């Protein structure tokens, strides 16, 4: 009899003490373009961001709110589920601006 591993039974390693990436809501975006505010992935000490707009056939953008406040609230909650505090996320985002 084989044991099937499911996401509910999987044991995941703890998140790193220093997160290497998080989500953020870029404030300069036009919510009408995608039907709401789209989060971006940002990586520690890497310039730029990666909007979660979907790629490929059938893909759609991630919409985390119709208002900036809704999207930012969802972003904080999503990062928190990954063990990333608001202060950690702010530090990661700030690190993306320190490049020439």
Image (cartoon, rainbow, N blue to C red):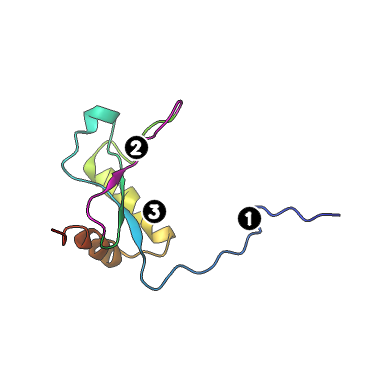
Disc 1 to disc 3, how far (Cα)? 18 Å
Q: Nearer the viewer, residue 34 or 96?
A: 96
Please state the horizontal and vertical placement of residue 66, each as a whole percent of the image.
28, 35
Q: Name which of mark 2 and mark 1 comes first in the sequence.
A: 1
Q: CA distance from mark 2 to mark 3?
A: 13 Å
Give the residue drawn at x 63%, y 60%.
Answer: 10
Q: Is residue 51 above or below residue 100?
A: above
Crowd rating for badge 1 (residues with CA inside 10 Å; few <14, some 14–19, many 20+)? few
Residue 77, quarter of picture: bottom left
Q: Earlier in the sequence, mark 2 or mark 3?
A: 2
| Residue 8: mark in rendering | 1
> In the drawing, what numbered circle is on residue 78?
3
Task: Left or right? Give the position of 14 relative to 70.
Answer: right
Q: Earlier in the sequence, mark 1 or mark 3?
A: 1
Which residue in the rendered view is the most extreme toward the bottom? Answer: 17
Work out whether 71 lies above or below 76.
above
- For the magenta stretch, what is the residue range? 46-58
**Between residues 54 and 72, which one lies in front from this camera angle?**
54
Quadrant location of the C terminus? bottom left
Q: Characterize the local packing of mark 2: few (<14), some (14-19) or many (20 or more) Cα atoms within 10 angstroms.
A: some
CA separation in Å, label 2 and label 1 = 26 Å
Mark 3 packing: few (<14 Cα in 10 Å), some, or many (20+)? Answer: some
- Residue 2, image x and y in percent? 81, 54
* Residue 79 coordinates in the image, percent (x, y): 37, 57
Circle 2/circle 1 CB separation < 8 Å:
no
Q: In the visual, does 65 lie left or right of 10?
A: left
What residue occupies the far left of the structure in this picture?
100
**Kind of element beneath mark 2:** loop
Q: Quadrant of residue 15?
A: bottom left
Which label sits on residue 63? 2
Q: Position of residue 92 (x, y in %)?
A: 27, 62
């Amino acid at each position: 009899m084989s044991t099937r591993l499911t996401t509910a039974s999987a044991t995941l390693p703890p998140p790193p003490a220093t997160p290497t990436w998080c989500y953020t809501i870029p404030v300069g975006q036009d919510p009408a373009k995608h039907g709401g505010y789209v989060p971006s992935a940002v990586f520690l000490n890497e310039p730029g961001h990666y909007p979660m707009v979907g790629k490929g056939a059938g893909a759609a953008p991630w919409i985390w709110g119709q208002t900036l406040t809704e999207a930012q609230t969802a972003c904080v909650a999503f990062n928190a589920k990954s063990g990333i505090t608001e202060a950690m996320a702010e530090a990661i985002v700030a690190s993306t601006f320190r490049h020439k």
